[in-house]
Every structure is written in structure tokens, then in C-alpha cells.
Image (cartoon, rainbow, N blue to C red):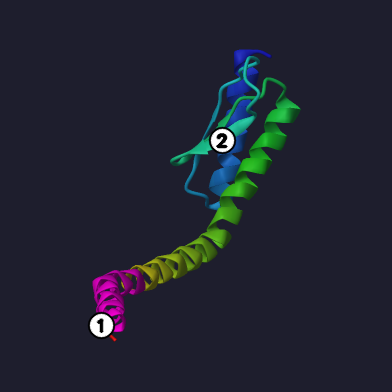
Amino acid sequence: MKKGEQKAGEARMQRCLERLGLPLKVKWIPRSETSKHGEIKVDTIYIYDVDPEEAWLTFLHEVLEFKLDEVTRVYRALVNGLIEAYEKLIYDRKERFLELVPEIFEAVASEKVTEKLK
């Protein structure tokens, strides 16, 4: 593939992002030595495919993944909030248990001694 063809494809991909109103940039950096087709880093979609058809499929995949992430982010926040709340609850219960341990040993030892005296 020629450099001009790559730049023209990258420009069309960028126009597509702008038309969709997505706050992303696109960089098409053909690399035949990588198994990764593309990825999103910060605010940029990187496309590594050499073949233009493959590059467009990867572009589509990355755009869909970006939009899907917006949907699933709410669920991740909810789940993470629940995990945090349960961790606090479990920590508080563990601390109360650990504070009671010396009393348990003392009570058992005290009763054990009382039993021997009888």
C-alpha cells in the first residue's frame, strides 16, 4: 500500500468520527509484524492493519467498542460501588470479631479454671 492511500484512508476514517460526533482521533499505522489489529489509547484509535479492507473492519470494531464502553461503564461503576460497600461491611465485621477474640479466650480460660476447682 502506498503512503498516500494510507493517509487518504486515515482522513476518511477521521471524517467518519467527526460525522458521528465522537471525541476521537484515528491513526492508521500499518504494521505487518504485530498480531494486534487495533486499539484505543486515551483519545486515539490506532489501526495496525496493512490491508485497507481489514483496516476498515478494525476501525468499525474499535468505534463499536468505544460506544459499547459508554453503555457498560454505568454497570462497572455500579458493581464496583457494591464491591466497595461490601468490602467495608466485611472489614467492619472482621474488626468487631477481632476485638472480641481476647474476651473469648478470657471467658474460656476462666470457665476452664472454675471447672478444675469443682
SS at mark 1 in the image: helix
Q: Nearer the viewer, mark 1 or mark 2?
A: 1
Q: Main secondary structure of the magenta part?
A: helix
Please identify the quadrant where the C terminus is shown.
bottom left
Q: Which residue is mark 1?
A: 117
Residue 20 point in image, percent of width and height: 58, 51
Q: Amino acid at mark 2?
A: Glu
- Magenta-span inclusion, residue 102: yes
Please identify the quadrant where the N terminus is shown.
top right
CB contact under 8 Å: marks 1 and 2: no
- Displayed quadrant of residue 63: top right
First to last magenta residue range: 93-116
- Residue at point 45%, 41% (across, down): 43
Label 1 to label 2, Cα distance in Å?
76 Å
- Magenta-span inclusion, residue 20: no
Q: Amino acid at mark 1?
A: Leu
Report the residue that reaches farthest toward the bottom.
118
| N-terminal label among 1 and 2 | 2
- Residue at point 51%, 61% (across, down): 76
Depth check: 116 or 88 in front?
116
Residue 97 point in image, percent of width and height: 32, 73
- Displayed quadrant of residue 81: bottom left
Depth check: 68 or 104 in front?
104
Q: Which residue is mark 2?
A: 39
Report the residue that reaches farthest toward the front.
118
